[in-house]
Image: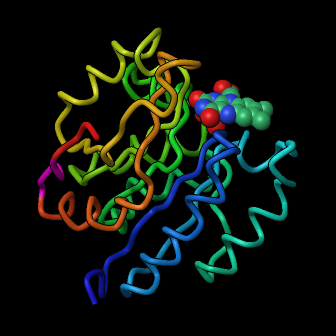
Amino acid sequence: MLLEGKKIGFALTGSFCTFDKVIPQIEKLVAEGAEIYPIFSETAANYDTRFGRAQNFKTRIEGICGKKAISSIIDAEPIGPGGFLDIIVVAPCTGNTLAKIANAITDTPVTMAVKANLRNQKPVLIAISTNDGLGANAKNLGILLNTKNIYFVPFGQDDPIKKCNSLVAKFDMILPAVVEALKGKQIQPVLV
Ligand SMILES: Cc1cc2nc3c(=O)[nH]c(=O)nc-3n(C[C@H](O)[C@H](O)[C@H](O)COP(=O)(O)O)c2cc1C
């Protein structure tokens, strides 16, 4: 098993349309022996949308991980002093969370968890899903592509004609990207 003994924080933010693609990836990490700590942004934990009820997603993911979700800044804070996570995966990562991480804003459970892991010089792997990746958020993406201990799940344009600034990660590459990030390496190619 590729991830035996690894402790992974798996953080979901409010790109609700991608949850169904992300959940099977969490199952893959569990199947590879990882212990997963689910983390939810307040948005992900609380918004009922046309893609489903927040509580249903939360319960499902808690069931897969066998752990209660971290869904407050207070719950996320011990990740820093405890230093118990080998890596944090942010998938899906909204444009909002991407911008906050790039600009050191720490006002959600997910940004708190990311800050805590970076403080411990541990890796953070980001799987973006945002309509402004090549627009207002391009500068933040650039900052994070050049930031120590931050890695990306390969991403590309999902609809260049109708949403020309939109970028989305290839979620099915989360597992190999985690394996590489744990070795301190960015999986290649980044652009797909
Ligand atoms: C139904 C729905 C779908 C959304 N999809 C996305 C998305 O795919 N990408 C994104 O960046 N924001 C998306 N948003 C907006 C975010 O949820 C919003 O920016 C929120 O403040 C993000 O908070 P968070 O980053 O703390 O989770 C969506 C909002 C709703 C209601």
**Residue beneath the point at 55% across and 59% down:** 22
Say which of 162 and 102 sits in front.
Answer: 162
> Is 186 a magenta residue?
yes
Say which of 182 and 155 sits in front.
Answer: 155
Q: Which quadrant of the structure image shows residue 177?
A: bottom left
**Residue beneath the point at 33% across and 24% down:** 141
Query: Residue 102 placed where, x, y %?
Result: 37, 24
Q: Which quadrant of the structure image shows residue 81?
A: bottom left
Say which of 142 and 40 sits in front.
Answer: 142
Residue range highlighted in magenta = 184-188
In screen coordinates, is 9 left or right of 120?
right
Query: Residue 160 placed where, x, y %?
Result: 46, 22
Say which of 75 and 46 sits in front.
Answer: 46
In screen coordinates, is 2 left or right of 134?
left
Query: Residue 78 placed where, x, y %?
Result: 48, 58
**Residue beneath the point at 30% across and 87% down:** 4
Q: Quadrant of ligand 1?
A: top right
The overriding secondary structure of the stretch rendered in magenta is loop
